Image: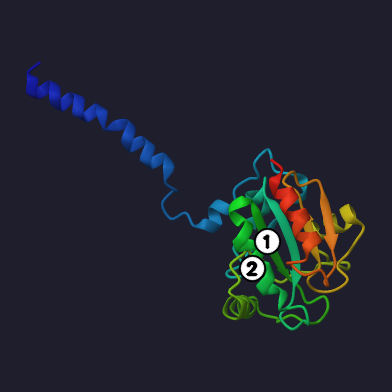
């Protein structure tokens, strides 16, 4: 084999692993974030998170298993409530602690007759008024006969159903320990933040 032929042969084979690696690391053509989010739950996903809910902005399905291993703060929200200003504090918490593993999950609800009817209107209100960037889900029931399955489990775990908007459930990284806080507990409440930081410190 000539030197030129040998060089061409080596160059051809040396590019194969790089091409394969690139193809494997990229999503399939046409795959959307929603499609990827709806993939089967990983084996280490706790039972509390084995649910899928539509995203507020576009109603694409989102698996809660993507938050496995995080500290979660689950809040039922409303646009016309006396506690609606807490959006600002919740977003501040999210920005401050998200790099340490906190995720705030917002579930708009009209169970107390204080929420808009259209998901897009809710999304626009949250972002334009309070700059909400933490994950939000489509309007849902958080109590009563049609309560969504996550809130049914949260009530069972704590013995506390939401008594009003902006009730809070703080969930540890394992998805097994849940603490309930009422609407009057501010996102910056000292005792609440102390427990949040303690959960974030656990690995």
Tell which circle, 2 or 1, labels the residue nearer the N-terminal end.
Answer: 2
Q: Quadrant of residue 156?
A: bottom right
In this rendering, is residue 64 above or below 88? above
Residue located 64% across and 68% down the image:
91
Query: Mark 1 packing: few (<14 Cα in 10 Å), some, or many (20+)?
Result: many
Mark 2 or 1, closer to the camera: 2
In three-dimensional space, the C-alpha distance between marks 2 and 1, rounded to whole angstroms, equals 8 Å
Nearest the viewer among 79 and 22 is 79
Q: Are marks 2 and 1 in contact (CB under 8 Å)?
A: yes
Position of the N terminus, as image quadrant, is: top left
Nearest the viewer among 186 and 135 is 186
Residue 125: mark: none
Residue at the far top in the pictured view? 1
Residue 104: mark: 1
Residue 91: mark: 2
Position of the C terminus, as image quadrant, is: top right
Nearest the viewer among 188 and 57 is 188
Image position, residue 189 (x, y; %)? 78, 66
Q: Quadrant of residue 23?
A: top left
Query: Does the image show residue 50?
Result: no
Residue located 77% across and 78% down the image:
83
What is the secondary structure assignment of the residue under circle 1?
strand
Residue located 42% across and 46% down the image:
26
What is the secondary structure assignment of the residue under circle 2?
helix
Image position, residue 177 (x, y; %)? 82, 48
Nearest the viewer among 190 and 196 is 190
Q: Quadrant of residue 168?
A: bottom right
Query: Does the image show residue 202?
Result: yes
Residue at the far right in the pictured view? 159
Residue located 68% across and 68% down the image:
90
């Amino acid at each position: 084999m000539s030197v030129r032929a040998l060089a061409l042969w080596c160059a051809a084979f040396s590019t194969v692993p790089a091409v394969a690696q690139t193809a494997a690391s990229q999503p399939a053509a046409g795959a959307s974030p929603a499609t990827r989010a709806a993939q089967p739950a990983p084996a280490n996903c706790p039972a509390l998170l084995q649910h899928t809910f539509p995203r507020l902005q576009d109603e694409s399905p989102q698996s809660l298993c993507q938050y496995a291993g995080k500290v979660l703060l689950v809040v039922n929200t409303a646009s016309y409530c006396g506690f609606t200003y807490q959006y600002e504090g919740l977003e501040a918490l999210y920005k401050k602690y998200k790099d340490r593993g906190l995720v705030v999950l917002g579930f708009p609800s009209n169970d107390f007759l204080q929420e808009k009817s259209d998901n897009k209107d809710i999304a626009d209100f949250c972002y334009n008024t309070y700059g909400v960037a933490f994950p939000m889900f489509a309007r849902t029931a958080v109590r009563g006969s049609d309560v969504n399955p996550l809130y049914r489990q949260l009530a069972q775990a704590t013995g506390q159903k939401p008594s009003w908007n902006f009730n809070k459930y703080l969930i540890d990284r394992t998805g097994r320990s849940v603490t309930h806080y009422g609407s009057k507990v501010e996102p910056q409440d000292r005792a609440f933040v102390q427990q949040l930081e303690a959960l974030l410190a656990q690995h």
